[in-house]
């Protein structure tokens, strides 16, 4: 098999010599041989498929660390590598949509049109809301917190010895924003509140996991958090962990949060199905949570337009791991008001064995 100089290999692989040198240093694409006297790098044709895959993945913006994983997988299982690429791009599209929402929000704020063109203003709507929690039938204490108010819905699921305090503090921090934050400050307000809660958890963590139930990577006390704060005709959503937000619109239910869990990352990568995830031994392992760690606490922040007739559900995993999606859709679609929906959903979780704490908050957008 003939050797190719770095220049010839660069032309064949559609990568520059500079890029090839960088990828060699990173261990992503090492030359087949380096001349001990001249230092010249030589490649072989068998390396071209990997090099061309690297070139294509760089064009779509995949990080170098992820490219290395995909290339290694490609050499042993090309279909699996394809699934990983598809999952990566689905995540890019989701994040792009969130950034588009943020840009629209900022443009509207700066142009003096905070409600958005052609969208009904929040002043012409009101929220009907309810929230509830239950200890469940197995856990000795309730570490879930739920809140529903005229502008705010929030659910937090605490873990560790100090989980109840952590979840309560997270929700309290957002309740304080209900009357004081609006307009362009809403996303900054949510981000700042999450940062404060995470710092408090770092300073107050006991390091004893106790009866933790769900847990983050660190094993210390902390909480997940999903909340929505309405501003104008939009809601700002903040999300960390595996508490969830659902939307009922036009009779269809969609989940508008993405779990920050090990099993969800495996589903995204195509190595696990949603059905397999329900019985995976590490299904409760969190990759992000407000546990005092800066690495784990980065929240998802995004905006959604509110439409009259929308019904929103926020809930902890004590609900959705026990109550199936069909039952959740049925209750949201048929319950007369939010209080009835909350009561029926909690009752279904308890009828399913109530293995965990249950928390949910429901709100309807109605025209004044």
Image (cartoon, grey):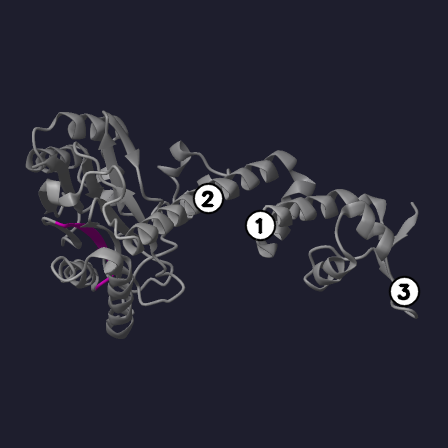
Q: Give the alpha-carbon distance from disc 3 to disc 2, as whole Å.
A: 42 Å
Of residues 110 and 245, the one nearer the viewer is: 110
The boundaries of the magenta stretch are 151-161
Residue 13: percent from left, percent from top? 77, 47
Mark 2 lies on residue? 91
- Relative horizontal placement of residue 112, taking residue 216 as reference (left or right): left
Depth check, mark 3 against mark 2: the one in front is 2
Depth check, mark 1 against mark 3: the one in front is 1
Residue 246: percent from left, percent from top? 25, 38
Q: Is residue 256 magenta?
A: no
Residue 258: percent from left, percent from top? 36, 44
Q: Earlier in the sequence, mark 2 or mark 1?
A: 1
Which residue is drawn at the image coordinates 26% and 30% (left, top)? 253
Mark 3 lies on residue? 35
Which residue is drawn at the image coordinates 40% and 43% (left, top)? 97
Which residue is drawn at the image coordinates 10% and 35% (left, top)? 367
Does residue 282 appear in this view? no
Mark 1 lies on a secondary structure that is loop
Q: Earlier in the sequence, mark 3 or mark 2?
A: 3
Q: Give the alpha-carbon distance from disc 2 to disc 1, as whole Å.
A: 12 Å
Mark 1 lies on residue? 61
């Amino acid at each position: 098999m003939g050797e190719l100089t770095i220049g010839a290999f660069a032309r064949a692989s559609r990568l520059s010599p500079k890029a090839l040198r960088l990828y060699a240093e990173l261990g992503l694409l090492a030359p087949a041989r380096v001349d001990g006297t001249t230092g010249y790098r030589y490649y072989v044709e068998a390396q071209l498929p990997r090099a061309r895959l690297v070139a294509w993945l760089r064009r779509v913006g995949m990080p170098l660390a992820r490219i290395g994983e995909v290339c290694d997988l490609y050499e042993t299982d090309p279909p699996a590598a394809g699934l990983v690429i598809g999952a990566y791009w689905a995540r890019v599209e989701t994040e792009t949509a969130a950034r588009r929402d943020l840009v629209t929000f900022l443009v509207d704020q700066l142009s003096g049109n905070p409600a958005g063109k052609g969208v009904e203003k929040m002043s012409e709507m009101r929220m009907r809301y309810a929230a509830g929690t239950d200890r469940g039938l197995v856990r000795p204490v309730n570490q879930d917190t739920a809140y529903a108010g005229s502008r705010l819905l929030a659910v937090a699921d605490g873990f560790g010895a100090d989980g109840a305090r952590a979840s309560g503090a997270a929700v309290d921090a957002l309740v304080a924003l209900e009357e004081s934050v609006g307009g362009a400050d809403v996303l900054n307000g949510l981000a700042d509140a999450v940062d404060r809660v995470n710092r408090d958890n770092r300073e107050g963590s006991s390091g004893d996991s106790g009866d933790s139930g769900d847990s983050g990577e660190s094993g210390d006390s902390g909480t997940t958090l999903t909340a929505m704060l309405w501003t104008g005709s939009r809601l700002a959503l903040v999300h960390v962990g595996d508490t969830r937000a659902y939307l009922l619109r036009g009779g269809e239910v969609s989940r508008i949060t993405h779990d920050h869990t090990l099993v969800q990352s495996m589903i995204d990568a195509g190595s696990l199905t949603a059905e397999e995830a329900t019985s995976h031994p590490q299904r409760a392992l969190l990759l992000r949570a407000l546990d005092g760690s800066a690495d784990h606490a980065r929240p998802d922040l995004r905006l959604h337009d509110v439409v009259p007739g929308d019904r929103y559900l926020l809930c902890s995993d004590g609900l959705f791991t026990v109550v199936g999606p069909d039952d959740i859709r049925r209750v949201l679609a048929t319950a007369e008001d939010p209080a009835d929906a909350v009561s029926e959903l909690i009752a279904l979780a308890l009828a399913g064995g109530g293995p965990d704490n249950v928390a949910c908050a429901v709100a309807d957008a109605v025209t004044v």
